[in-house]
Every structure is written in C-alpha cells, then in structure tokens.
Image: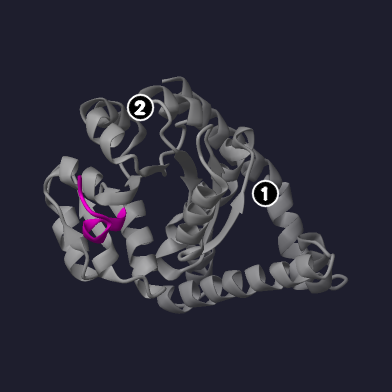
Amino acid sequence: MISAANRFEYGFIGAGNMVSAIVQGMSAAGVEGESLAITDHSGKRAPVLAKAVDATYLPDTAELIRRSKTVILGMKPHQQNQLLRTYREEIAQSQPLVISIAAGRSIAQLEAQLPEGTAVVRVMPNVAAQVGLSTTALCGGTHTSAEQIRTATALCEAIGSAQVVAEELFPVFTALAGCSPAWFAATVDALAQAGVAEGLTKTAALTAAASAMEGTGKLIQAALAGGNTAADIVDQVCSPRGTTVAGLLAAEDAGLRRVWHSAVRAAVARDAHLSAN
C-alpha cells in the first residue's frame, strides 16, 4: 500500500493537446508541479510536458495509477478501452477518482469497464485551458460523492470556468464550448483574409479580428449578467443604414446562421457515433 504522502494529487495518462492545455493552465494558476504526474504511451510528449511544469514523468502507467489520488484519462476514446482493461486491477487496488476528458464516452460506458464502485467524473474542457479560459462541463457517476465533484470542479476552475451539466446535454455542450474554439479561429482567419483582400497586412488583420472577438465575448458576458442577450449587442452596433448592418445582411444572405446550425448538428451527430462505437 502506498502512503498518502507518496501519492500525487493528479495523475495524467496521455500528453496530447488537451492534457497539455490543462496541465499548463493548472501550472499558470499556481498548482504545484510536485502534485502532478504524467505518462503517455509513446514516452515522447509526457517527459517534455512534465519538465515544462516541474511535474513528475512516470514511464510506468501502473505506477502512476497506484500513486495518484485522481487519475485523468487523457487519451482518445478508442484508446480508453484497452487501457481500462489492462489496468483494471491497479484501479481496483488504489481506488482513485477517475476523470475522463474524452468526447463520446458516457458515464455508463466508463463504469462498465471500471471496477465496481469506482468514482467517475466525465469532464469536457476546451483548448482555452491553456490560457486559463476553458469553459468546462462536468457530471458525476453512480458512485461519485459530492466531495469528489468538488475535487473535479476545483480542477476545472484552475483552467477557467466550470459547470455541472446533465450528461444528456454533453453532446451539445461539446459542440458549443469544446469544438467552437476551432470554429472561431477559422472565422477569425476568414475575416483576416477578407481584410488582406482589402489592403491590410495579414498580421494587422488577424490582430484586429481576434481583438474584436475577444472584446465581443466580454461584452456578451456583461450583457448576460445584466439580463440582456447577444442579440442586444448586435442591435447596439447596427446603426440604421450603416456598414455593420450591411455586412451582417450579406453574411445572413450567405447562410451565416445555417452554417452554425449545421456545424452544431454535425458535431452532435459525431459525438453520438463515438458513443455508439
């Protein structure tokens, strides 16, 4: 039996983009590197990530599970099956809180593969964890206590904001908060290309579009806090016969809202496919 003094608060299995964002976000938020352990299958990315935040790299996944109070499954959904089969005994012995950040992996699927009584939390962060601005959803399993939900929430709040969400709403939350950073980045790039076509440099255009998107996000948050909506911001900026409303109507004619509805539906459908397989 490993003593509490020799256990890490958090053990990460996997060192891909999302785990890297979470670990770097935790480090920036002041979480001590000595409380973190990291491993990955290839042994390539985990050592680099661990060194960057003064965490411990453990090449042995079984040791990481045995020595971690909370184990974060950071691999892709299809890789979880083999890992949970391989290390079922270690999980049964150490009884960590298990947190999954994989899209399309339900609580029921996780609990079916884990030893009876294992506490599970499903978490869906986004890549903005790297700058402390993730919007994260979480939900607990059958054997998860209120204290363990608080532990998972504290982890999520170290990298941004967190909210408990009913699991049936995870697919749409994943689309709106998990997938949208890539969509927003693509939108900024498209706006910048349009700016270049009209004479700006790419750097100037990207800076203008990204700054405007950041500021608009804060305006919408302030509007929501005051009981208003994003539509109120639109009305505020669209003066009669002005440039904004002209551009907005052109975007609407080109299918602006249809594009976003299609993107969300496609992401939700993909999540359902991952869950089924």
x and y percentages locating residue 133 in the rendered image = 51, 66
Residue highlighted by disc 1 = 256
Q: How is the image coloured?
A: one colour
Quarter of the image for residue 172 reads top right
**Badge 2 element:** loop
Q: Residue at x 17, y 67 (%)?
A: 51
In this rendering, the answer to whether 25 lies above or below 43 is below
x and y percentages locating residue 141 in the rendered image = 52, 35
**Badge 1 element:** helix
Discs 1/2, front: 2
x and y percentages locating residue 224 in the rendered image = 77, 65
Quadrant holding the C terminus? top left
N-terminal of the pair, mark 1 or mark 2, is 2
Residue 53 as seen in the image, left or right of residue 175: left
Q: Is residue 209 visible?
A: yes
The residue type indicated by label 2 comes to: Pro
**Which residue lies most toward the right here?**
240
The one of 222 and 157 positioned closer to us in this rendering: 157
x and y percentages locating residue 121 in the rendered image = 48, 42
Which region shows up in magenta? Answer: 1-10
Residue 82 as seen in the image, left or right of residue 160: left
In this rendering, the answer to whether 101 lies above or below 230 is above
How crowded pointer 2 is (Cα within 10 Å; few <14, some 14-19, many 20+) is rated as some
Q: Residue at x 58, y 72 (%)?
A: 214
Mark identifier at residue 115: 2
